Image (cartoon, rainbow, N blue to C red):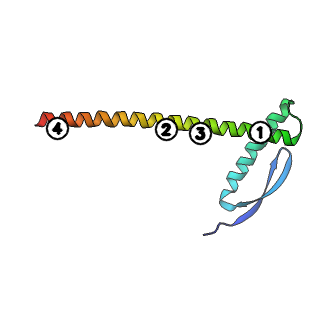
Amino acid sequence: MRTNSTPVTVQILDKEYRIACPDDERDALLSSANYLSQKMKEIRDTGRVIGVDRIAVMTALNIAHESLHNKSLKESFSQSINQRLCALQSKLESTVNNCKQVEI
């Protein structure tokens, strides 16, 4: 099934852009554009980066770094959970085996 696509106007760093977007992703696009605009304004307002292109690149680098950091945290958390589950499974198997031996 094909999703309808409607142009959506978003405002990023005081400039408007029309972007074709599936209707069911409209809210996510608006949220993403708002987030991007906020981050670009933060960099612009520091006064250390001048020019929209440079602000966009610095923002993209910051968001990429943030994303990779979050991915790393997620992988670390997932690994920790897996280790805990394996330890719990081992304890359960040991307990079940001990109970079977007591029954015999």
In the structure shown, which secondary structural element does the residue marked by tag 2 occupy? helix
* Number of numbered discs overlaid on the protein picture: 4
Distance (Cα) linking label 2 and label 1 = 28 Å
Disc 2 residue type (three-letter): Ser
The x and y percentages for residue 76 are 52, 34
Q: Label 4: which residue? A: 100
Q: Residue at x 71, y 47 (%)?
A: 32
Q: Residue furthest bottom?
A: 1
**Sequence-first tag of 4 and 2:** 2
| Residue closest to the eye, 80 or 27 | 80
Q: Residues within 10 Å of mark 3 (few under 14, many from 20)?
A: few
Where in the figure is residue 28, as x and y percent of width and height?
A: 68, 51
Mark with earlier residue (2, 1): 1
Q: Earlier in the sequence, mark 4 or mark 1?
A: 1
Tell me the element at label 3: helix
Residue at position x 73%, y 36% in the image: 62
Q: Mark 4 and mark 1: span between their CA atoms?
A: 61 Å
What residue is pinned by disc 3? 71
Q: Earlier in the sequence, mark 3 or mark 2?
A: 3
Residue bearing the label numbered 1: 59
